[in-house]
Amino acid sequence: MRRLEHLFSGKLTAYQIATATGIEIEIISGLEAGSVCLESIDQASYNKLFDLERSLFSSEIEQQHTSNETSA
């Protein structure tokens, strides 16, 4: 299952994400609204979104990952 927990958290606009990834703004808007699911986009587009999330939110992702490890 594909997940991008931080990218669509409201910190970035659809325009910013679309501009950064080169993905059509309609697709990004649909992902934000929930009318398009991550499973329905092609792998290359998902990889661009994943890379953007990783580069922008790496500290939050690492903190969440560390938190999950210690709670187990």
Image (cartoon, rainbow, N blue to C red):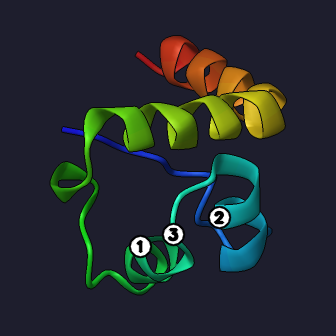
Disc 1 is placed on an element classified as: helix
Q: Quick check: marks 2 and 3 in contact, CB under 8 Å?
A: yes
Where residue 63 appears, x then y in whole percent? 73, 26
Residue 24 - label: 3
Q: Do the residues labelled 3 and 1 touch (CB within 8 Å)?
A: yes
User: Could you tell whether 12 is left or right of 3 in the image?
Assistant: right
> Of circles 3 and 1, which is in front?
3
Q: Is residue 42 above or below residue 47?
A: below
Secondary structure, mark 2, is: helix
Q: Residue at x 28, y 55 (%)?
A: 38
Choose top left, top right, bottom left or bottom right for residue 51. top right
The quadrant in which the N terminus is found is top left
Foreground pick, 33 / 63: 33
User: Does any portion of residue 37 appear in the rendered image?
Assistant: yes
Q: Can residue 13 be seen in this view?
A: no
In this view, 61 is above or below 45: above
Amino acid on which the number 3 mark rests in the picture: Glu
Q: What amino acid is labelled 2 in the image?
A: Ala
Alpha carbon distance from label 2 to label 3: 6 Å
Q: Which residue: 62% across, 24% down?
A: 67
Which of pointers 1 and 2 lies earlier in the amino acid sequence? 2
For the image, the number of numbered tags is 3
- Which of 4/36 is in front? 36
Image position of 49 with respect to 24: above or below: above
Q: How far apart are marks 3 and 1 (CA)?
A: 6 Å
The disc at residue 27 is 1
